Image: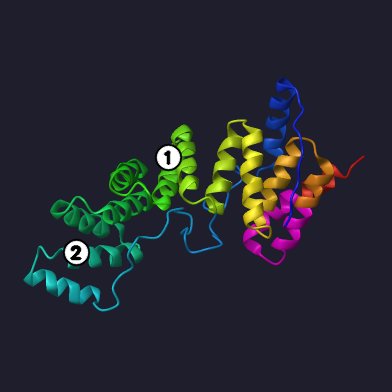
Amino acid sequence: MTSYKWEIIVGVAFLGSLISVLWNILQPSDQVTRSLSDRKDPPTELISAQSSQSRPVSEPSSAMSEEALLEVLKKDPQNPDAHLQLANIYAIKGQLEPAIKEYQVVLRNNPALWEVHYNLGIAYYDFGKADEAVNHYHEALALRPSEADIYLNLAVAYTTLGNLEDATKAYQESLKLNPNNIAARNNLGNLYRRSGKLNLAIKEYEEALKLSPQDVLTNYNVGVMLDIVGKKEEAIRYYDTMLKLASGKPQYQSYIKVAENRIMQLKKP
């Protein structure tokens, strides 16, 4: 397993200017480094494409189709199971407005269902209403405080709203419940890095790398951090590892270009 140690001995004023310069050089195009749960090609199905939200708790039932459920509701308009199954079907199909309406019907009849608050939070987030998503994640946590994915999704929603302090707290809570979540560790490291807390960022990236030494963006993030603190040879090593792992994977093209450029710059005398 890859491991590394280093010390940060840099003056505060110099460090601030160094980070500012490297930030513009290192980031692909228009955004800071996107970590596992933010990217469009998540390594697992726990994080959905670009919405960065974990999947709904319950998948649509294969026993009943959308048409069959609508027939059930014609005969029994208040049937909670039919409304819930229909909401999940709409959500999975990306039909967010009807999904939200169906989840709301379920909650009007039984507001104590944490799974429905959670699923509704996901639907609201994907619908572009992160503030509403936050509200329902908090409702879900009040009913189910031991669920790590709720904190993870809450953190992503807070980040979208620009509330980085609460996003950080939510990632920390998620990791208390599930210390092995690579996405949470990468995202938390990115938040620490954005706020200049480099030691804490390094710690999170290191933990993520221990969990998955072959992950492309974790190696990239470590390379960036080593680059920022002036560890040239170590930065080159992690950039090289990242390039080998990303070879033949076009979804990493922007990161590949950055890594190649930085290796070239770092090797200059």
Q: Residue at x 30, y 58 (%)?
A: 96
Q: Is residue 98 left or right of residue 152?
A: left
Q: Where is residue 190 shown, x and y percent of the image?
A: 59, 41
Boundaries of the magenta span: 239-259
Q: Which quadrant of the view contains residue 20?
A: top right
- Label 1, on which residue? 158
Q: Where is residue 170 shown, x and y percent of the image?
A: 44, 41
**SS of the residue under disc 1:** helix
Q: Is residue 187 left or right of residue 76?
A: right
In terms of depth relative to the viewer, which is nearer, 2 or 23?
Answer: 2
Q: Residue at x 55, y 38 (%)?
A: 191
Q: Residue furthest bottom?
A: 63
Q: Amino acid at mark 2?
A: His
Label 1 crowd bin: few (<14), some (14–19), many (20+), radius 10 Å: many
Q: Residue furthest left?
A: 75
Q: Where is residue 125 shown, x and y percent of the image?
A: 37, 49
Q: Where is residue 30 shown, x and y percent of the image?
A: 59, 43
Asked if residue 244 is among those painted magenta in the image, a careful observer would answer yes
In terms of depth relative to the viewer, which is nearer, 21 or 157?
Answer: 157
Q: Residue at x 55, y 42 (%)?
A: 188
The Cα atoms of the two marked residues, 2 and 1, are separated by 29 Å
Number of the label disc, if any, that sits on residue 83: 2
